[in-house]
Image (tube, rainbow, N blue to C red):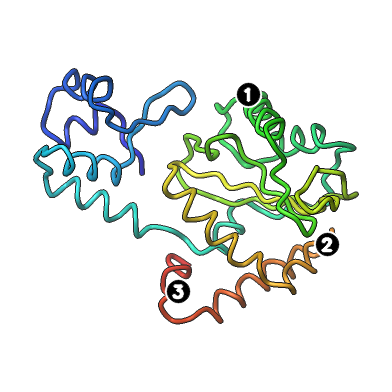
């Protein structure tokens, strides 16, 4: 869930012009997606409390729903898909293929997304080692999508990605989320499961789609009870 400035002003019971002034003068956090401004309920709640702005119950409820509504990684991956035999002879070719094949709504500018991915790689490789990369723009990939997802792309042929360990990359995970906080929580879960040696071995096989998903489900099932309740939400 993300709020437009009009929705945020309604929740705070102020004029939209007042909210716009707070954005400009008092650094109320706002994110721009496809040239439209959005405000995250949790960030709005925290900002309002910090600045002594009365916070109605509806805003607190929206913030709580946002923090709780995080699907398990296996659900996110099932939504985004595991894409096999991705072509691309070099980094740019792979990034363009990813931008083309991501399951995104039609209005999203895929060419602009490719440009952002390429610009991020120019700043430093997102290859994290062990043949894995997590391409993303300088800020997380926050797009106007209704639900978050994770897509996994397994390359037909591994390529040089300037990864931190110098090894070529075979598997690329892409996290797409409607908000930055949600993106970061998903990224943390992904980083946790990628510590598993068996999963990393599966990612070296370009035909291991079902095995990857099964392994992630097993890791989620084996997680300690407290962690499992968080990572298993909405399964």
Q: CA distance from mark 3 to mark 2?
A: 27 Å
Image-based side of 3 in relation to 122, left or right? left
Give the labeled residue for mark 3: 227
Q: Is residue 215 above or below residue 11?
A: below
- Secondary structure beneath disc 2? loop
Q: CA distance from mark 2 to mark 1?
A: 30 Å
What residue appears at the point 64 percent right and 47 percent down from the top-left corner? 174
- Quarter of the image where one finds residue 73: bottom right
Q: Is residue 87 above or below residue 8?
A: below
Give the labeled residue for mark 1: 112
Image-based side of 37 in relation to 198, left or right? left
What residue appears at the point 57 percent right and 34 percent down from the top-left corner? 138
Of badges 3 and 1, nearer the viewer stands: 3
> Looking at the image, which residue sits at the far front?
165
Mark drawn on residue 204:
2
Query: Quick one: label 2 or label 1, which is nearer the N terminus?
Result: 1
Q: Nearer the viewer, residue 36 or 159?
A: 159
């Amino acid at each position: 869930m993300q709020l437009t400035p009009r929705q945020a002003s309604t929740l705070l019971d102020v004029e939209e012009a007042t909210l716009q002034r707070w954005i400009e003068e008092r650094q109320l956090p706002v994110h721009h997606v496809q040239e439209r401004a959005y405000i995250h309920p949790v960030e709005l709640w925290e900002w309002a409390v910090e600045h002594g702005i009365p916070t109605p119950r509806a805003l607190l409820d929206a913030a709580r729903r946002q923090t709780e509504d995080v699907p398990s990684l296996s659900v996110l991956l099932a939504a985004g898909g595991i894409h096999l035999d991705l072509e691309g002879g070099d980094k740019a070719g792979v990034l363009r293929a990813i931008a083309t094949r991501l399951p995104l709504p039609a209005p999203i500018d895929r060419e602009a997304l490719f440009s952002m991915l390429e610009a991020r790689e120019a700043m430093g490789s997102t290859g994290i080692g062990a043949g894995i990369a997590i391409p993303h723009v300088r800020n997380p990939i926050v797009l106007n999508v209704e639900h978050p997802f994770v897509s996994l792309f397994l390359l037909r042929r591994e390529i040089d990605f300037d990864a931190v360990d110098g090894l070529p990359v075979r598997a690329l995970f892409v996290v797409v989320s409607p908000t930055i906080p949600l993106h970061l929580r998903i990224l943390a879960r992904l980083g946790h499961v990628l510590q598993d040696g068996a999963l990393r071995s599966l990612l070296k096989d370009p035909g291991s789609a079902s095995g990857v998903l099964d392994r992630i489900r097993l890791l989620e099932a084996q997680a300690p009870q407290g962690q499992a309740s968080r990572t298993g939400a909405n399964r």
